[in-house]
Image: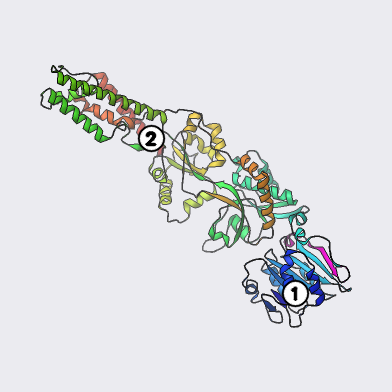
Amino acid sequence: MTFHCNSFSVTSEFRDCFDEVGSYSLSAARTIISQQKSYKYVNLEKNVSAQFQEILRYKFYSPSIALLDVSCTNATIVLEQASKLKYFNKTYQWLIIDENLNSNVLETLNSTMEIGLNSQILYINKTESNSYELYDVYSKGRHIGSPMNISFFAKWSYKKRLEKANELQEMREIIHRGQFNLLTLRGVIVIDKDNITTNEQVFKLLQAEDYKSVGLFSMIKYASELVKVISDRLNFTIDYRVTRGWAGRLQNTSYRLGLMGVVQRGEVDIAASPSFLRISRIKDLDFYHQSWIFEAGFIYVYSNLVKHKSGGGDFLAPFNHNVWIFSLISFIFIIAKGNQMVITDSVLLQSVAVICQQGLDPAPKKPAIRIVVFSLILFSLLMYNYYTSSVVGGLISNNDPGIKDLEELAKSRLTLIFEDIGYNKVVMTEPTNRSIVMKIRKKFFSQSYTSYELDGYTTLSKAISYIRAGTHAYHCEFIPHYDEIAKIFDPNEICNLRTITGLLKHETLAMVLTKKSQYLEMFKIILTRAREVGIVKRELKRIQNSRPKCQGALTVSPVAMASVLNAFIILMGKSDIFKMEVSHFEKFLILFSWCYNFIDYCWTRNFLG
């Protein structure tokens, strides 16, 4: 693209100058100058300010050249519009031609606030000796008081031709532009804690060993370490601004709140916090460097409160109900047929005796009947061995996963509590069409708490005793809290630890910057290099914690009352235990078992409110 006026023409000296410039970034410009043509010409004799944005977006799908003749009347308007709309960036290679010996274009550029670290401006000035001097122009941040840097690149003349002081590509890389000389950048950080306003307070929290207990989240700690890597490499300091949350909007407006709003409006230069990458945010923000894996859900301990949810129990589980019925009918039919008896209580008792390896009374006399009875006793022995081995093996393996998903959790008797952090409050209050979220909300807001010390939104240190008791499910980000759980839980409790995900999406968070930020490219390069040399991995390993491993090779769970309820029903007989011919001691044992199960059930229900 060429911005010119009616009197604009390319001199032969200027063409010869560009024929000898060896930089790849100027290859398109050499074509424009030598062939006297461009993709699009813009006549500066006309007013271009109204349609400036459409002009620069005209069929450009890759880095483009913008050639500006500053001798034209409206050239300063082009510079002002390019500054206002942030077109001094890496997408546009600006070639500013100044053939007037007394031009004030440098003063105009110096007053331009949007010339930044990623500016690609080559200023070409004609001297009194008919030679051309080429300068690379950029700034580390005019908005924070950094001066404009004008670095000499090369000089061209007829006698000495092109004399390069440096390679232009190297001058625009981090090796030349990566020294900020203790310049102070504006930063923002999320700290959900009262009375944190000064930079000294922020750095004191960031340097604290027990940062989790003072309102600083692990993802913020990690992001601040990445910011420190960037600041150490570029040699700048940070003046932090504190927000209490990440996002939100002013009611019935598009005005963003929290860290996202501050970054979107360009009020800061760097953010020490990762963020969810949402489609609705891409048009307003730039994202870079994804490394923090966010996984949140409910943590609970597998206890009797969870086991009660199965209802009927597992007493008959080793065999299908059809197998039990068919086997019992076969025993009764064969014994009745063999003894030529009518099916009565005596036959039923004889069948149970054969199953329990007690034989028959009276003993059969015919050899054929004895062979049949012997076969039945042998068959019952095999069934008995398989049944006992299945029950014992099932108890030892302990394969019961507990509550499988949010649907079961919403129906369970566990009390739901949440970590006191912004995204949990958002997911529990923002409008949604997800039915499972509505069920969790209904359960959460209908709960009543028996302890005034524990609120619905709380910290892990306050909730951990309730989690250990197996009565509460705590929603939080898993990774930051595993170390505290490993310190307090015993090995059996760690083996019984369960998690349920699904309320929040499992994703990798990204660092965030203002849209078209001048520092984006440089920050990307530094953190990419930090990932390659292992610095990012070291910080992740230091701050993130893996789930504590179950130390017990075999964990045996005690049999709950619900699992043997069917056995007690069988013992009761047809209607009432007092109609059975059992001893008073046996009656006492059955009544005691019933009363114990009833008291245990009532206690857990009352504890949950």
Helix, strand, or loop for circle 1? Answer: helix
Residue at 70% over, 66% down: 88
In-image side of 413 versus 512 (left or right): left
Q: Which one is in front, 187 or 101?
A: 101
Q: Amino acid at mark 1?
A: Ile
Please state the horizontal and vertical placement of residue 345, each as a whole percent of the image: 15, 25
| Label 1 crowd (10 A; few <14 / some 14-19 / many >=20) | many
Q: Amino acid at mark 2?
A: Lys
Q: Which one is in front, 339 or 77?
A: 339
Q: Which one is in front, 63 or 417?
A: 63
Please state the horizontal and vertical placement of residue 69, each as a whole percent of the image: 76, 75
Where 270 falls versus 316 (above or below)? below
Residue on which disc 2 sits: 307
Image label count: 2
**Mark drawn on residue 33:** 1
**Magenta stretch bounds:** 140-160
- Quarter residue 461 falls in: top right
Q: Are marks 1 and 2 in contact (CB under 8 Å)?
A: no
Residue at 51% over, 63% down: 252
Where 196 falls versus 357 (above or below)? below
Q: Is residue 232 magenta?
A: no
Give the Cα separation between the discs numbered 1 and 2: 81 Å
Residue 217 in sight in this render: no
Please state the horizontal and vertical placement of residue 338, each as a whole percent of the image: 13, 23
Q: Earlier in the sequence, mark 1 or mark 2?
A: 1
